């Protein structure tokens, strides 16, 4: 479900509660509308919370390696831009490429290892 649908669910739930309390004189109708509104709000809030909190991570070592690799990608781009500007092959760019290859090897070793 898209996030705007979850937000819309919560807003519709609040509107139903407001309309039920303000416009209805019958306590049973008010109660029914309040319950429906609360269920809609909870549906929106719980799915939003699940999206924000997300699943627990099990493969932390692999995730760490991938995060570090993405940092190297940024550094490689910076070094490549500098090398292109000066028309000189950069030793830093070469070092980053070697580190990326080593990081890919470590990703292969870390894949499938749970917790740490």
Image (cartoon, rainbow, N blue to C red):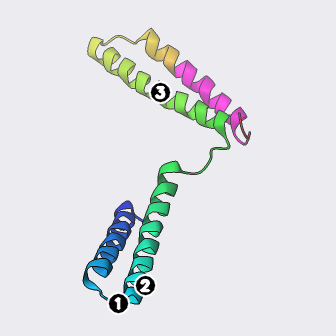
* Residue in view at x 45 percent, y 58 percent: 48
Reading the image, the residue beneath label 2 is 32
Q: Is residue 52 above or below residue 85?
A: below
Q: Nearer the viewer, mark 3 or mark 2?
A: 2
Where is residue 5? Give x, y as percent: 36, 67
Alpha carbon distance from label 1 to label 3: 62 Å
Lower position in the chain sequence, tag 1 or tag 2: 1
State the image quarter where residue 86 is shown. top left
Reading the image, the residue beneath label 1 is 26
Q: Residues within 10 Å of mark 1 (few under 14, many from 20)?
A: few
Viewer-closest of 70 and 96: 70
Does the magenta portion include 100? yes
Where is residue 35? Give x, y as percent: 45, 78
Q: Dots 1 and 3: beta carbons under 8 Å? A: no
Lower position in the chain sequence, tag 1 or tag 3: 1
Label 2 residue SS: helix
Label 3 residue SS: helix
Reading the image, the residue beneath label 3 is 71
* Residue in view at x 47 percent, y 67 percent: 42
* Residue in view at x 42 percent, y 82 percent: 31
* Residue in view at x 44 percent, y 61 percent: 45
Label 1 residue SS: loop
Does the magenta portion include 53? no
Q: Nearer the viewer, mark 1 or mark 2?
A: 1
Q: Which residues are the magenta region?
A: 97-112
């Amino acid at each position: 479900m898209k996030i705007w649908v979850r937000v819309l669910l919560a807003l519709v739930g609040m509107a139903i509660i407001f309309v039920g309390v303000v416009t209805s004189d019958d306590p049973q109708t008010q109660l029914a509308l309040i319950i429906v509104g609360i269920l809609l709000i909870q549906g929106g809030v719980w799915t939003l919370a699940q999206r924000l909190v997300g699943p627990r991570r099990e493969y932390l070592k692999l995730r760490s390696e991938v995060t570090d690799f993405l940092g190297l990608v940024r550094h490689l781009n910076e070094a490549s831009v500098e090398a292109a500007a000066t028309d000189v092959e950069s030793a830093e760019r070469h070092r980053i490429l070697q580190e990326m290859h080593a990081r890919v090897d470590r990703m292969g070793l870390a894949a499938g290892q749970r917790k740490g």
